[in-house]
Image (cartoon, helix red, strand yellow):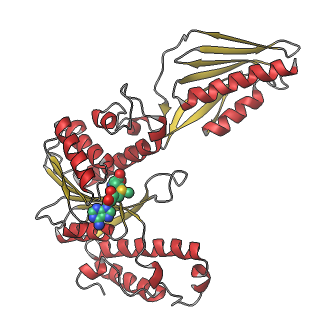
Amino acid sequence: MTKAVSDDKKTFVAALAEALENETFIKLTLGKFRAEGEPRKAVATLVLLKEVPHLKLVTTFARKDETKTFSFNDGINHLKSEIGADYLSATLFSTERDMTLTYSKKREPHLTKGKPTLKAAAPAAHDRAKSYLVAPDRPYLKALQVSDKDGRVKPSMQGKYRQICRFIEIIDTLLKEDDRARPDSALSIVDIGSGKGYLTFALYDHLTTTLARTCKMTGIEMRGDLVDFCNALARELGFSGLRFDAAEAQQASAKQVDIVIALHACDTATDDAMALGIHSDAKMILVAPCCQHELAPQIKDAAEGLAGLIKYPLFKQRQADLVTDAARALLLEASGYKVKVIEFVSTEHTSRNILIAATKSANANREKAREQYRALKAATGFETQHLASQLKDVE
Ligand SMILES: C[S@@+](CC[C@H](N)C(=O)[O-])C[C@H]1O[C@@H](n2cnc3c(N)ncnc32)[C@H](O)[C@@H]1O
């Protein structure tokens, strides 16, 4: 009997894990509460927290509901501990089938499977409106293999999809804050280090399709194969205002540009993007830095007490990343921008999770930022910084 119990429960829990992984999960109900305490029943459904699907378990008592939210792994473990112990009945509803595991008074299991009785529902979300900013069935997401032909995000591309959603959510908010006066104006945008174009296509699609704005957008990318791929895809999708140029970030020039973005463009390409934005008087500059190599070899224990922070190579690199990005933020302020530093995607998914968002502002305290930049430079001992060397009056 022990083996049978174990096998049926294993099958049920495996089906739950599979349904969550394949995104066929609809809900799971728990009944026949037989433990001590107030009678209750429970239902688990999906909920989005910061774009990440979680399990929400609502336990219903006679006079109240109690809600707990779990990551998928924690949720599976929690349900596993309750099924067959506190609750003698559990039913899993997925788009593929229903599966019920019940236990007799003697705790003998009985597993039944049947056709699906429920249709899939979108996960209820604390921030559902935001998640809908990027519908997973957009044609560019299918073409870039983020979603499958039925418009469902592929399991292996969930992280990329979340990054796209978060980026669009951030820029959408910034545009609303910044652009209230002229929401109908045409936008000119340059994306430095556009790569395969995930975020470039997402932003172009959001602006032109969702917000119905006129937009000219250029992706700058040094890899010719990616540029050819992206140009072909832009043509195929009918994105007539979007083109990609094969060039080094440093060569990029623009007479008039509203927004410059550089998302995980490597090392000092981020500085080149910021310099382009500053020199062309862009009203918005958004960069997600990565591979900050320039300052680490230059940082010294110039300030008393810093030695402990840079003694160990890993800490030194992290410290250098922070110093690099803080210096960049200060240089943007010194150039007349208001700066926000935002978490791009949760650290659970990548350590490259900082987005520096700068909007042109007459109220930026340029002199104070210049002083803070110089103080940071003196305290950490670096001599040259790629953005600073392209700006006047900051050293
Ligand atoms: C990590 S990928 C990011 C791609 C894209 N921005 C995204 O977030 O999906 C970085 C891209 O920047 C390009 N890149 C790096 N340094 C560059 C430079 N100096 N000039 C132009 N492109 C550069 C690389 O070839 C690569 O495709």
Q: Considering the image in quadrants, where does the C terminus appear?
A: bottom left
- Point out residue 171 in the picture as x, y percentages from the top left corner: 31, 51
- For image coordinates 57% across by 30% down, the residue present is 20
- For image coordinates 18% across by 71% down, the residue present is 279
Q: Nearer the viewer, residue 147 or 381?
A: 147
Q: Nearer the viewer, residue 41 or 378?
A: 378
- Say whether residue 52 is left or right of residue 215: right
Q: Nearer the viewer, residue 183 or 383?
A: 383
Q: How many marks?
A: 0
Is residue 63 at least partly visible in the picture? no
Is residue 95 at least partly visible in the picture? yes
Compared to residue 41, the image places residue 145 above or below, namely below
- Point out residue 247 in the picture as x, y percentages from the top left corner: 21, 62
- For image coordinates 18% across by 58% down, the residue present is 258
Q: Considering the image in quadrants, where does the N terminus appear?
A: top right
- Point out residue 116 in the picture as x, y percentages from the top left corner: 55, 12
Split into quadrants, the picture shows ligand 1 in the one at bottom left
- For image coordinates 33% across by 39% down, the residue present is 144
- Point out residue 291 in the picture as x, y percentages from the top left corner: 42, 67
- Say whether residue 226 is left or right of residue 382: left
Compared to residue 159, the image places residue 305 above or below, namely below
Compared to residue 92, the image places residue 218 above or below, namely below
Q: Nearer the viewer, residue 116 or 229?
A: 229
